[in-house]
Image (cartoon, rainbow, N blue to C red):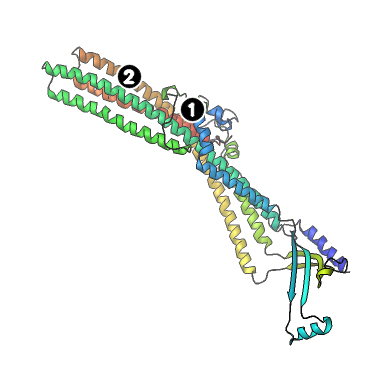
Amino acid sequence: MKRFNLYTILLLALVWSGCSVSKDLALPEGLAPKMFRNAVPQDSSSVGDMPLKSFINDLTVQNLIDTALAKNYDMQIALKNIDAAEVLFKQSKLGNIPELKLQVTASSSRPSDNSLNGLSLNQFTGSTHIEDYSANLGLFWEADIWGKIRNQKAGALASFLQTAEARKAVQTRLVANVAQGYYNLLMLDAQLEIARKNLKLNDSTLRIINLQFDAGQVTSLAIQQAQAQQLVAAQLVPRLEQNVALQENALSVLIGTLPKAINRASRLDKMSIPANLNAGFPSAMLSRRPDIKSAELALDVANAKVGVAKASLYPSLVITASGGVNSFKASNWFNVPASLFGLVSGGITQPIFQRGQLKANLELAKIDREKTVIQFRQSVLNAVGEVSDELTKVEKLKDQYSIAEKRAQTLQQASHNASLLFKSGMANYLEVITAQGNLLQSELELATIKAEQLNAVVGLYRSLGGGWN
């Protein structure tokens, strides 16, 4: 009969282990629009699907990115987080495995001769002390009746996958930052070259004005005006050199190396802007972006926590068993079967006084789950907004660059003509200085817009979920 009762408990445990007391909350649907603002997708393809080295084909940038992925400390921390989450996940997989412990003990006790134990011991055994030797295996197993252990495993798996998505998010941000830092460096190189070229042009103009002053054709005001214009270009040179060094230092730290000069084999004017930058459909973007995937997994974690909290309100069934050898004499310790002993028990535990606290934990877990859904909605909204912003930048910067390029070409011709007319006496020094100043500003602005174009393209690639593949 006892054996039948034990088998009954075990059978019920196996049947109830498939039960679940918590219903998972599903992700909200229909959050992404059919298409991005001001974008008409040509087809379902997207630049976000492109492999990293296919999208960024400049070898220097590729080498910098490879170095950053290997040495950047944020990236290394993300990888260590994955290792830690993997250990916790493996640990959670052991939740259904019974605990098995081996215990070996030996004890000797001597009761008082005047105590009841001492008198009885001396009377029946003729000895003044008791020896006890025991070796046993103990087993402890909690039946997963309400899915608590299963939810713990599911939560650990989701947390592990979250760390993998977090690594991808760090990589996409790192790739974009390295590429944009390099493009900014090329922009500063171009602007430094422009400033030095303009400084030489101002030197030439100043020499001519000095000759005219010596000939009595102009006053000292002309020299002062020309010198002031020359100093504007001269002041730009050390400022841009400073910015170049600072950008090199920032890029060095980003790739995980000590500050140093960055080798670059490219020029800003040689960098091309991709013609076809199809963004595809928002729904496909959501499946690529690591932060969105991480937000999805966060809901899995929250669902698991609710399941664990709710299962804690219900009874738990624990099966224990132990067996081994026991003897009062060391010589009889392994006298089998006389020294064998065994014990099997099953118990159901129902929390009573802790129920209020457990209910509060359940309500907090449900609130956290609702917050996770809101955060998922916000993540989708931010993602769609980022893509829309980058698409707008790409489109409008293309128009700005076209206009700025025409303006720079016009001012280059105007400066050249002003110099020729000045040398022939058909234009005054103010016209020359004004033309040179306008040319300097237009060429600096053109370089800035070109760098913004390159940065916007990389920003679009990252916002579409590219950079981790």
Lower position in the chain sequence, tag 1 or tag 2:
1
Separation of residues labelled 1 and 2 (CA atoms): 34 Å
Q: Evaluate if marks 1 and 2 touch, with contact meaning CB atoms under 8 Å apart.
A: no
Most extreme residue toward the left is 216
In this rendered view, identify the residue nearer to me: 445 or 187: 187
Up-down: is 330 above or below 47? below
Pointer 1 residue:
60
Pointer 2 residue:
410
**Residue drawn 60% across the image and 36% down it:** 284
Is the C terminus in the top left, top right, bottom left or bottom right quadrant?
top right
Label 1 secondary element: helix
Query: Circle 1: is it few (<14), some (14-19), or many (20+) Cα within 10 Å?
Result: some
Residue 312 found in image quarter: bottom right
Up-down: is 185 above or below 113? above
Residue 457 seen in the current view = yes
Residue 26: horizontal and vertical position, in percent? 64, 49
Most extreme residue toward the top is 424
Residue 449: horizontal and vertical position, in percent? 40, 29
